[in-house]
Image (cartoon, grey):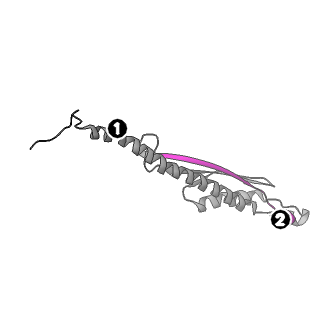
Amino acid sequence: MRTWHGPGGDRGTVSLYVVMFAPIVLMLAGLLVDGGLAIHARQRAADVAEQAARAGANQIDEAALRRTGDPVLDTGRARSAACALVRRYDSEAVPVSCTATTDRVDVTVRLTVRSQILGIIPGLGQFTMTSAATAHPVTGEGAP
C-alpha cells in the first residue's frame, strides 16, 4: 500500500498545530468562563452588600424618632442586622466590615470563588471580589 505525503512532506503538521494551539484555546475558554464567574461574583458581592446595608438602615431608634422626628439609627442593632444578613444571604459571602453611625450603615463584603478552568494554573485557583455599600435611614417626606 502506498501513501501519498505530498510534495513537501507535510507529515505531522496538523499534530504540531494541535499541540501549539490547544493551550491557547484552553486559556481563551478559561478567560471566558472564569471571567464570567468573576463578573457574576462582583455583582453578587455588590448585591449582598447593598441588601445588608439596607437591613441595617431599617434599625431606627424609635424613641429618638418620636422625640426628635429625625430617623436615628440604633447603631448596635444596625451593625448586627447588617452582618447577620450577609451571613444568611450567601454562604460564600463574608462580612469584612459592618459599621454603623447614627445616620448611616457601611457594609463591605468579600466573596471568594473557585476558578473552573484556569484553576489548573498555579496561583489562579480562586479569586476574591470585594464590594461595599452604604445606606441611610429615611422616613416620611424624604422617602423615595
Mark 2: amino acid: Thr
Residue 24 sits in quarter:
top left
Name the residue: 16% across, 40% down.
4
Quick check: is 134 in the magenta stretch? yes
Residue 121, image x and y in percent? 42, 41
Mark 1–mark 2 distance (CA, rounded to whole Å): 64 Å
Mark 1: amino acid: Met
Asked whether residue 137 appears in the rendered view, the answer is yes
The residue at the far top in this view is 8
Residue 83 sits in quarter:
bottom right
Residue that mark 1 sits on? 20
Closer to the camera, 33 or 111? 33
Q: Is residue 120 above or below residue 55?
A: above
Quick check: is 23 in the magenta stretch? no
Name the residue: 44% across, 51% down.
116
Q: Residues within 10 Å of mark 2 (few under 14, many from 20)?
A: few
Q: Relative to 35, is 106 on the left or the right?
A: right
Q: Relative to 64, is 75 on the left or the right?
A: left
Residue 112, image x and y in percent? 53, 50
Residue that mark 2 sits on? 139
| Element on which disc 1 rests | helix
Residue 110, image x and y in percent? 59, 50
| Element on which disc 2 rests | loop
Q: Quadrant of the N terminus?
A: top left
The residue at the far left in this view is 1
Circle nearer the N terminus (1, 2)? 1
Which mark, residue 130? none
Residue 62 sits in quarter:
bottom right
The range drawn in magenta is 126-143
Closer to the camera, 32 or 143? 32
Nearest-to-viewer mark from 1 and 2: 1
The residue at the far right in this view is 68
